[in-house]
Every structure is written in structure tokens, then in C-alpha cells.
């Protein structure tokens, strides 16, 4: 039996240890995966999709939804196509459009979200020149007319002339794929040479381009690419690079070119810092500085598009209305104008976080607006370290806090941390303009909390069952529940610790039992032991054994309890209160009146499974236990119901005690002081305190062999309380010592020779 219990203990300890190890290992591995994803060492597509969804949600929740009056979009819309003809329009019409915008409407800046990579041959100049070099080469009249008409029929020249000396930015297309004809048209002047900057390998590298005709690009003030090489995997335009690397030169996006042109083409200064993550370099791009305007970008020069709201955040004016001069001048005067299209047939509609079909030209307008307002969301270089620290903190929280808390409290803390994390993330986004991950920490926190619940369910269920098997017969179910939720390791093996023991015995039970039938006697015993046991359980005590009509209980094991003495004294006082109810019930049944004696002692005891190969029990042993039994026996001699030792008094000082005597119990040579607990000090009245003070003075006189003074005090107390046996005891002793004085080295202790 002992071997089986020992095996059961080691099996429980081994299993619990491995359950905790598996839980810790699972949480650690998941956290490392999430950290690797955050650091871009690996990609978890589901997490990325969730991040994109929450990014879009934050953006839609915080957009300003106002119209920027500084920027106007000249829209090549369906109405313009219907009235002016299908696209592309003749360049003379575009020249007229440019002239109208600058000469009539006095716009501040003009950008084209359109590329003009092919010459306009609709004027027929090529055919006429072919005729002039062929059959009509000798026709002087024809040749003269051709020279006169050439400027009017060369629409590209007309368009180029309209662009000259005006703040115009042309758009072009760059591609990361090598086309059959890798270079079409002309690129604008690059921003800088890529080889000068160590961060340039991290920029998007383009392989080909479709630029504007050289005569047009030379006439324009600047140019920028309008395509987006950094569209997310779900096809949504959330980010836009401001720079790309082509043939070892850095070229700017259309929105950045417009911004620089508006400021007078200032130099671009690069802000760099130490990198983190998979693609870190010694000098990683963090931002651009242009005329004291700070533009936060990531290592690939990508910024987060600062959408103002759904399509329509900028005024749209139909191109045909501008051509026909029907637009009020005030709507365009001193405005930044971008020519683009919202017509579905021209295929410039994009998917964005704020709208599924969104005009591409408005994406550039949003970026330009954000650059002017300095409202670009940023991801500083340090944010990755902060995100990794956040994930690590979540792991530590889940591993070391959640398992130690009750289910309800852990659920509350989980909800608080979840809500706080979301709120702080939105605060960083809305107030500090910082974009940081949200789905990853939310998912990690939820996942790790779920793991704790999963493992905790099986672990606690198993632990409760094991605790019940080990201790259920000794301690109350409530304490088994508390033990199962504790991280303390419990065992049945022997150990030594400070505890408090209680012995309770029914006075004169032998006499009572002689006059009762066995069945009735059994009911009487149960009527006493049941409520007493309930009191002990209510005060977190462990029942050691029932010895006939007696009960032995202890505090401080199997679960450590630093207040074991306090709980024991409270239990003893509560048993005496319960005795009143027991006596009332017995009287109603016609049973004899019963009384109880209680002894308490605190000290070092051995506790554990003890017994033989045939029978074993979880019990306590030691001199301190024996003393508790002796104290219970002394209650009859002093006429009190409860006696505690001095060590119990010192361990439970919140009670008021009456000193009874200084005694040597049977089997002990060293004297001890014994006390009767009267109750919690706060509940003791002033009259009772005066009596105690008088008693203490009497005891002092008695031990100093001042017999007359002591006799006067005890006679006074006996006169007030004639039924209190204690005062009679001392009066009898004093009378004896007056006739037979004690020895000179008398220490004031009385020696008891019986148990």
C-alpha cells in the first residue's frame, strides 16, 4: 500500500512537471514563430492577411473625410470621352488644355497621370513629308505650303511648346520586368546616383520603362513614375515607393516630383539609421528630408498612402469643361492640378483600403496632400524592436501569470490586456502617426491564452483528481480546490515543518456511553463529531484522525499556511460556539449534556504518510504533538474548555488570552506557560481586561512567594466569580505553601503527574 501511494505521488509529480513543460514549450515555439514573422524572417500568410484587414479598418476609422481644396483633378471621364472623342486625344487638344489651365485659369502646378510615349501622327505631317520627298519634291507651291502648315500640323511640337517654362510634371511607367523594348521614350532627370548610397540595394529595382517623348520630357519641368511596384499580395494599394532604382540611378514617384516642383525642385536629403530584421544594412533608409519637410519611409522608400477618405476627397472637374471654358475660374486659380482618368475603359481604377474601385490619379493626390500636411504614417526603425518586445512580453504574461490565476480573473486580465493593446495601437496610429502591428499581438495573446486554458483544463482536472485521491479523506474539498490551483508541490512523504495541532475530547464520555444503546450512542457521537469537523474544515484544518469521541486535527499541512496558529485558535473558539448548539439539540432529544475540552500547541512537527506495510495514514508526530494532547487533558483540571501553549499565543497575537499557569506536563522537565483564549482582542470588554490585569498581578505575587498579597487577589476574584475553578486552585496552593513553603530554587511551576 505504501509503495503504491509513493508510486502514485511520483507519477503525479512527473506528469505535472511534463504538462507544465509542454505548455511552456508550446507558448515559446508559437511566440518565436510570430517574432520571426514580425522580423520578416518567415512569412505567415494568414497573419499578413489579418494585419492588412486591421490596417484597413484603422484607416477607414480614422480618415478625415474632408475635401482638400488645394488639389483638383482634371478628369478624363466618360463625359469627356463622349464629347471630345476616344482616348488618346490629339496633342494639339492637350496643348490647348495646358494653355487653358495656365493662361485662363492660372493654376499653380500641373501634373499628368498619363504617359505620352508614342508620337502623335494624326496631323499627317509624316505623309506630307513622304510626298514632299517623292512625287511632289519639285512642286515648289506644295513645298512652300508644307513649311507654312508644318507647325500647325506637328501636334507633338505644339504640346511640347505648351509645356515649356511652366511647372508641369509628366508621368511615366516603370517596370520590374524586362520588356522586349526596355527603353521607350525618355526618363526625367534622376534624383541621385544610386551607387552613392548603401541603402540603394533595398530599393525596388526596375528593369524597363515607358517614358514620354524626349521633346515632351525636355519641355516639362520634371517627371515621375505613376505605377506602384509595391502592391500588396491581395492587390490593395496601401503603400507606394517614392524612389526606384533604374540603371544605378534613383528616380522619383509622380507625387514626390509634384511636391518637389511645388517647392522649387530642392535637393532630396536621405535620413538613414541602423537597420533591424532580415534585410538590415549598416545604413538603412528611414526618411527623406526636403526643405525641412520630413517624409517617413521604410528601407525600400515606401510610404503608407495617407488616404483622406473615399473617392471624392478632391474636387473632380471634367476635362471637357476645362477645354470649353465653362468652369469658374475660382475653382482652379492657384490650384495644384493633376490630369487623370476615372473612366473604367481606361483601366486606371485601383483597389484601396477605403474603396474597392478607386481612381488611380486620386492615389497620387492623397500622397501629395499627405506630404504637404505632414500626415504620413510612419514605421520608425525602432518600431520593430518594440514590436518584438511586445510579443515577448505577451509570452511572459501568458507563461508566468495566466497559469497562476483563477479562470475568471485570468479572463478579466486577458480582456483588459486585449482592450488596452488595441486602444494603445489606435492611439499610436491616430495621435503619433505610427503604424505598428495589431493582428500579430492580438492573435498571439489570444492563442497563448487559449493554450493556457487548454492545458489548464486538463492539468487542473488531473491535479484536482490527484489531490482528491491523496488528501480528500483528510482535508475539506475547499482546501483541495485551493491546493489544485496552487503552484506549490504537495506530497505525502515525511517532512518537518512548523504547524499547530488541535486535540478535542468529550468530557465524561465513558459515563455517558454506559447508559445508552449502541445505535443511539452512534447517533450521539455523530452529532458531536460532524459539526466539530465542519468547523475545522471551515477554518482550513486537516483532520488527522478520530479517536473514539476525540478528534485530532492540524494546520499548516499539506498546504503551507503561515497563519496556521490563527486559524487553529479561531477553529477552537468556533467549536465552543458550536457546542452551545449541540447542547441545545441534545437537550431537545433527551440526551445527556456534553462538554468538550480542547488543547492547542504550535511547534515543529513531522508530517507525512506514516504507518506500516499493511496500513498507512497521513498524520503528524513529535513532541509538539504530544504536548497538544497533554494540554487538552489539563482542561478538566483547570475547569476551562480550551488551553493553548505559549508558542501558540506568540504565533496568534491577535487574540486575548488568560494566563492559567506555569506547568510541567507528564514526560516534560522544562516548564511551559499555558493560556485560555478568550476571543479576538477587539471584542474584549474593559471589565474583562481589568480582571485579567488583576489576575496577572496575583500570578506575579504568587510566583514571587508573596503569599498574602496573592491570597488577597485570588480571594477577591473568587468572590466575584465563585464558579471559576482557577481561583480556587490558587487559593488551595497558597494555603499549602503557607504551611509547607517550596524550595528556595522554586520556579513557580506546578508539576502534573497525570495525563
Image (spheres, rainbow, N blue to C red):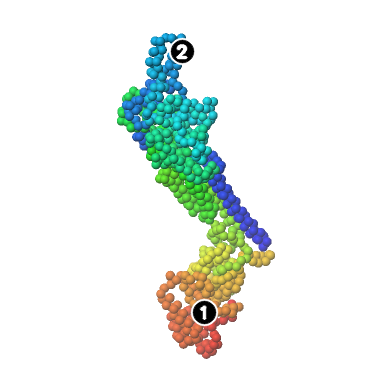
| Dot 2: element | loop
Which disc, if any, is residue 47?
none
Mark 2: give few (<14), some (14-19) or many (20+) Cα within 10 Å.
Answer: few
Q: Which of marks 1 and 2 is in front?
A: 2
Front residue of this view, candidates 616 and 296: 296
| Residue 741 in the image, given as x and y percentages of width and height | 53, 88
- From the top left corner, tell me how far across and down residue 120 is, in percent: 44, 20
Name the one closer to the observer, 601 or 535: 601
Q: Can residue 504 be seen in this view?
A: no
Where's the N terminus, which quadrant? bottom right
Give the answer, above or below, for where 200 lies relative to 327. Answer: below
Judge whether residue 5 can be spotted in this image: yes
- What residue is shown with label 2? 133
Where is 750 relative to 473, above or below?
below
- What is the CA distance from the residue labelled 1 to the residue labelled 2? 141 Å
Q: Picture coordinates of residue 73 (x, y %)? A: 38, 30
Image location (x, y in percent) of residue 538: 51, 63
Q: Residue at horizontal 35%, vertical 32%?
A: 108
Rendered image: mark on residue 661: 1
Give above or below for 389 relative to 105. below
Q: Residue furthest right?
A: 613
Q: Which secondary structure, mark 1?
A: strand
Amino acid at each position: 500500500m505504501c509503495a503504491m501511494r509513493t508510486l502514485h505521488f511520483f507519477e503525479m509529480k512527473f506528469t505535472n512537471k511534463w504538462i507544465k513543460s509542454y505548455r511552456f514549450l508550446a507558448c515559446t515555439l508559437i511566440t518565436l514563430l510570430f517574432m520571426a514573422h514580425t522580423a520578416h524572417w518567415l512569412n505567415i500568410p494568414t497573419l499578413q492577411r489579418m494585419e492588412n484587414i486591421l490596417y484597413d479598418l484603422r484607416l477607414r476609422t480614422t480618415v478625415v473625410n474632408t475635401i482638400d481644396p488645394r488639389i483638383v483633378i482634371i478628369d478624363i471621364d466618360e463625359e469627356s470621352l463622349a464629347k471630345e472623342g476616344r482616348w488618346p486625344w490629339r496633342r494639339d487638344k492637350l496643348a490647348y488644355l495646358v494653355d487653358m489651365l495656365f493662361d485662363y485659369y492660372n493654376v499653380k502646378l500641373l501634373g499628368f497621370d498619363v504617359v505620352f510615349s508614342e508620337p502623335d501622327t494624326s496631323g499627317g505631317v509624316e505623309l506630307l513629308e513622304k510626298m514632299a520627298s517623292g512625287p511632289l519634291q519639285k512642286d515648289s507651291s506644295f513645298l512652300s505650303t508644307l513649311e507654312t502648315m508644318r507647325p500647325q500640323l506637328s501636334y507633338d511640337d505644339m504640346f511640347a511648346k505648351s509645356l515649356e517654362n511652366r511647372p508641369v510634371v509628366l508621368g511615366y511607367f516603370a517596370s520590374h520586368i524586362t520588356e522586349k523594348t526596355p527603353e521607350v521614350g525618355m526618363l526625367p532627370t534622376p534624383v541621385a546616383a544610386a551607387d552613392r548610397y548603401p541603402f540603394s540595394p533595398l530599393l525596388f529595382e526596375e528593369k524597363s520603362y515607358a517614358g514620354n517623348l524626349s521633346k515632351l520630357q525636355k519641355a516639362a519641368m520634371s517627371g515621375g513614375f505613376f505605377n506602384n511596384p509595391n502592391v500588396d499580395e491581395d492587390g490593395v494599394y496601401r503603400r507606394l515607393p517614392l524612389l526606384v532604382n533604374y540603371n544605378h540611378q534613383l528616380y522619383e514617384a509622380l507625387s514626390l516630383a509634384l511636391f518637389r516642383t511645388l517647392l522649387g525642385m530642392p535637393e532630396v536629403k536621405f535620413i538613414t539609421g541602423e537597420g533591424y530584421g532580415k534585410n538590415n544594412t549598416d545604413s538603412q533608409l528611414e526618411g527623406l528630408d526636403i526643405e525641412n519637410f520630413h517624409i517617413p519611409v521604410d528601407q525600400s522608400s515606401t510610404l503608407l498612402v495617407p488616404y483622406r477618405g473615399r473617392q471624392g476627397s478632391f474636387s473632380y472637374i471634367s476635362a471637357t469643361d476645362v477645354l470649353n471654358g465653362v468652369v469658374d475660374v475660382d475653382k482652379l486659380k492657384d490650384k495644384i492640378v493633376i490630369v487623370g482618368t476615372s473612366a473604367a475603359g481606361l483601366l486606371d481604377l485601383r483597389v484601396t483600403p477605403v474603396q474597392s474601385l478607386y481612381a488611380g490619379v486620386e492615389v497620387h493626390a492623397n500622397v501629395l496632400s499627405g506630404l504637404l500636411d505632414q500626415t504620413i504614417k510612419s514605421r520608425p526603425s525602432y518600431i520593430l524592436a518594440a514590436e518584438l518586445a511586445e510579443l515577448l512580453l505577451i509570452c511572459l504574461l501568458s507563461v508566468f501569470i495566466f497559469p497562476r490565476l483563477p479562470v475568471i480573473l485570468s479572463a478579466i486580465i486577458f480582456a483588459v490586456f486585449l482592450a488596452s493593446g488595441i486602444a494603445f495601437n489606435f492611439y499610436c496610429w491616430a495621435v503619433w502617426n505610427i503604424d505598428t502591428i495589431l493582428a500579430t499581438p492580438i492573435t498571439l495573446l489570444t492563442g497563448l491564452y487559449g493554450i493556457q486554458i487548454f492545458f489548464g483544463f486538463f492539468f487542473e482536472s488531473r491535479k484536482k483528481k490527484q489531490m482528491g485521491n491523496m488528501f480528500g479523506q483528510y482535508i475539506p474539498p475547499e482546501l483541495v480546490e485551493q491546493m489544485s490551483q496552487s503552484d506549490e508541490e504537495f506530497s505525502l512523504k515525511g517532512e518537518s515543518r512548523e504547524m499547530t495541532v488541535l486535540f478535542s475530547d468529550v468530557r465524561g464520555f465513558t459515563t455517558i456511553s454506559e447508559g445508552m444503546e449502541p445505535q443511539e450512542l452512534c447517533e450521539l457521537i455523530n452529532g458531536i463529531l460532524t459539526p466539530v469537523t465542519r468547523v475545522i474544515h471551515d477554518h482550513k484544518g486537516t483532520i488527522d484522525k478520530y479517536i473514539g469521541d476525540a478528534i485530532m486535527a492540524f494546520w499548516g499541512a499539506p498546504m503551507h499556511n503561515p497563519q496556521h496558529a490563527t486559524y487553529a485558535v479561531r477553529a477552537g473558539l468556533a467549536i465552543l460556539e458550536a457546542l452551545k448548539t449541540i447542547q441545545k439539540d441534545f437537550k431537545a432529544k433527551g440526551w445527556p449534556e456534553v462538554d468538550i475540552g480542547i488543547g492547542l500547541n504550535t511547534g515543529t512537527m513531522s508530517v507525512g504518510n506514516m504507518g506500516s506495510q499493511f496500513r498507512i495514514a497521513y498524520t503528524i508526530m513529535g513532541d509538539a504533538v504530544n504536548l497538544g494532547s497533554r494540554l487538552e487533558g489539563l482542561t478538566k483540571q483547570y475547569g476551562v474548555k480550551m488551553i493553548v501553549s505559549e508558542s501558540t499565543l506568540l504565533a496568534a497575537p491577535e487574540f486575548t488570552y488568560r494566563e492559567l499557569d506555569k506547568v510541567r506536563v507528564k514526560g516534560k522537565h522544562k516548564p511551559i506557560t499555558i493560556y485560555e483564549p478568550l476571543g479576538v482582542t477587539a471584542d474584549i470588554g474593559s471589565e474583562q481586561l481589568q480582571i485579567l490585569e488583576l489576575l496577572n498581578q496575583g500570578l506575579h505575587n504568587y510566583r514571587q512567594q508573596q503569599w498574602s498579597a496573592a491570597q488577597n487577589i485570588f480571594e477577591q476574584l473568587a468572590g466575584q466569580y465563585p464558579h471559576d475553578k482557577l481561583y480556587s486552585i490558587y487559593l488551595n496552593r497558597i494555603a499549602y505553601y503557607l504551611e509547607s513553603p517550596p524550595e528556595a530554587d522554586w520556579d513557580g511551576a506546578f508539576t502534573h503527574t497525570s495525563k
